[in-house]
Image (cartoon, grey):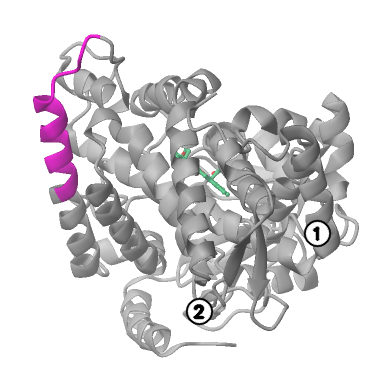
Amino acid sequence: MDVDFQNSFLFILLCLLSLLCYSLYIRKPQRLDLPPSPPSLPIIGHFHLILSLLIHKSFQKLSSKHGPLLYLRIFNVPIVLVSSSSVASEIFKTHDLNVSFRGLPPLDESLLFGSSTFLMAPQGDYLKFMKKLLVTNLLGSQALERSRCIRADELELFYANLLGKAMNKEVVDIGKEAMSLSNSIIFKMLMGRSFCYGEAERARGLVIESFALFKKIALATLLHKPLKKFGISLFKKDIMSVSDRFDELLERVLVKHEEEKRSEHQSADMMDVLLEAFRDQNAESKITRNHIKTFFIELFIAGTDSMGQSTQWAMAELMNSPNILERLRKEIESVVGKTSLIQETDLPNLPYLQAVVKEVLRLHPPAPLFARTSREECRIRGFYIPENTTLLVNVYAVMRDPNSWEDPNEFKPERFLASLGTGEEDERREQAHKYIPFGSGRRGCPGANLTYIFVGTAVGMMVQCFDWKIEGGQVKLEEAAGELNLTMAHPLRCTPVARAINPFGFQITCR
Ligand code: HEM
C-alpha cells in the first residue's frame, strides 16, 4: 500500500482519535444481510484503503476480488462501494430519490462546501430553484446557444496563443493551457459584463488550491459527525484560508456588477439573475450573498479542472495513436475545410470527434468516484443498506468493467460510433448506466453538454491546426497519485507546429 508522509501523519492522528471514539461508544452488532465486507482492521476498519495513492484503483482491485457491492467501514462511518453498471443501474432506477443527497458539509461558515452549498444541498426548494436558474441561464441548450460567441472568441484567442508558441518553437503544457481556457470561458459565462481576465486568473489559482484541499475536505466531511461531538473541526484553518480569499474576490465582483448598470441592448446575465433573486423578498427560495458566492465557487471547481483535464487526456491519447489522430484530422478537414476554424456548430457533423471525446471520458473520467447518501434504509441487490450510509460509486471501475466493455483498457473511439450514428434509443438506454462520467439520475452533472462542446472544439482545433512534437516520441499515460480527481502524472508537454492551412482564411467573428 502506497502511503505518503502527510497521510501517515493523518493516519496516526486519526487512530488516536478513534481510540477515544471507541472508548465512548460500544459498537453495535452488525446485521447479517449487509453487503459483503472484505477483511478490515480493528478500530479503523477499511480506513487504510483510502490512504492509497490511487483510491479508485485500489477500490477497483478490491471489487474485482470481493464483488461489485461492498460494505466498508471507515472507523465507525459506513460506506457502500458500488463498482458495476448493473448495481449502479439498480440504484439510479429504483432508489434515485432516496440517494439524491450527497452528505454533510464539513464547515458551516466556509464558502467551500459549507452551509450555503449547492453541490451538497438536500432535495428541496433551494436546490430546485438554483437548478432551474442554472439550466435556464447557463447550461441548458438555449442558454448555451446564447453564450456561443463567448466560447468562439476564447477559442480564437486560444488558437492565436498556440500559433504564437508554434512560431517561437515553444513547448506548451496542454493541461495548463486548456485549464486556462476553461477557466476564462466559465468565468465569462458566469460574470457576464463584469468579466476581467485578472480576476479570472485569481479564481483559477484558488480553484487549484481548492483541489489540493479536496482529500482533506472529503475526510472532514466523512468524519464530520463523529468529530463534531468532540468539538473538533478537521483542517478548519486551511479550508477557511481559501474560503476567505474566494469571499474577498467574489464580493468585489458582486459589488462591481451591482454598480455597472446594464445597457439597453444587454440581456440579463447569470449574475444579474442571481442578484435579482437575492433582492426579491418574494423569491421562490430566499438566497443570500453567500449562496451566490458558494454557487460560483462550486461551478468553477466542478467545471474548470474537469474540462481542462479531459482535453489533456484526449490529446495524450491521440498522440499515442497516430492512426486515430489521422482519421480524426481527415474527418475535420472534410467537414470544416482548411480555411475556417472549427466551431461548435460543426460538432453534430463530426461523429468521430464526438466518439473520441466520449472514449476519453470513459477511460479517464475526471471524477473517478462520486458520493451519495441514503436518506432512508433500503435494499440493493437484496442486501440491507442502512439509512445515512454513504454510497461511493466507482465511476472508473464501472467504465472499465470487462462485463460491460470489450477491451475495457483500450482507447477505441469506434465503439461509440454505432450509437452516435443511429441515435438509437435502445442503445442509449443500454449505455446509460455503464457510461457514467457525469454520474446519473437527478443529481447527475448538468455540465455534460458544455463539456462535450468544450472538449470537442478545443481538441478539434488543436488537431486541425497543429502537428505536435513530443520529446521521446511517446506520451506517458500514468495517473497522478494522491489526487481525488483523475490527473496526468506527467503533464503533457509538447511543441505545436503550425500546419499548412490558411489561418488568415479563418472568420474572426462568431458564425
Ligand atoms: C469533464 C467534465 C465533467 C465531469 C466528468 C463532471 C462530472 C460530474 C459528476 C460525476 C458529478 C456527480 C454526479 C452524480 O452525483 O450523479 C457532477 C456533478 C455536478 N457537476 Fe459536473 N462534471 C463535469 C463538468 C461540469 C461542468 C462544466 C459544470 C458546470 C460549469 C459542472 C457542474 C456540476 C454540478 C453543478 C454538479 C452537481 C449537480 C447536483 O448536485 O445536482 N460539471 N459532475
When the figure is inspected, residue 337 is found, relative to residue 463, above or below; the finding is above
Residue 229 coordinates in the image, percent (x, y): 24, 63
For the residue pair 406 and 338, the one nearer the viewer reads as 338
Q: Main secondary structure of the magenta part?
A: helix
Does 499 sit left or right of 175 as displayed?
A: right
The secondary structure type at the circle numbered 1 is loop
For the residue pair 20 and 322, the one nearer the viewer reads as 322
Residue named by callout 1: 401
Q: Is residue 31 magenta?
A: no
Extent of the magenta region: 249-264
Q: What amino acid is found at the position of numbered circle 2 in the picture?
A: Leu
Which residue lies at the image location 59% right of the left edge and 55% below the top edge?
A: 310
Whichever of labels 2 and 1 marks the residue nearer the N terminus, that label is: 2
Residue 137, label in figure:
none
Q: Is residue 261 magenta?
A: yes
Residue 357 coordinates in the image, percent (x, y): 69, 47
Residue 202 coordinates in the image, percent (x, y): 25, 55
Give residue 211's quadrant in the image: bottom left
Specify whether residue 199 is in view.
yes
Residue named by callout 2: 51
Does 151 sit left or right of 194 as displayed?
A: right
Which residue lies at the image location 60% right of the left edge and 88% below the top edge?
A: 1
- For the residues labelled 2 and 1, the Cα–Cα distance comes to 23 Å
Does 374 sit left or right of 121 as displayed?
A: right
Which residue lies at the image location 18% right of the left edge and 31% below the top edge?
A: 288
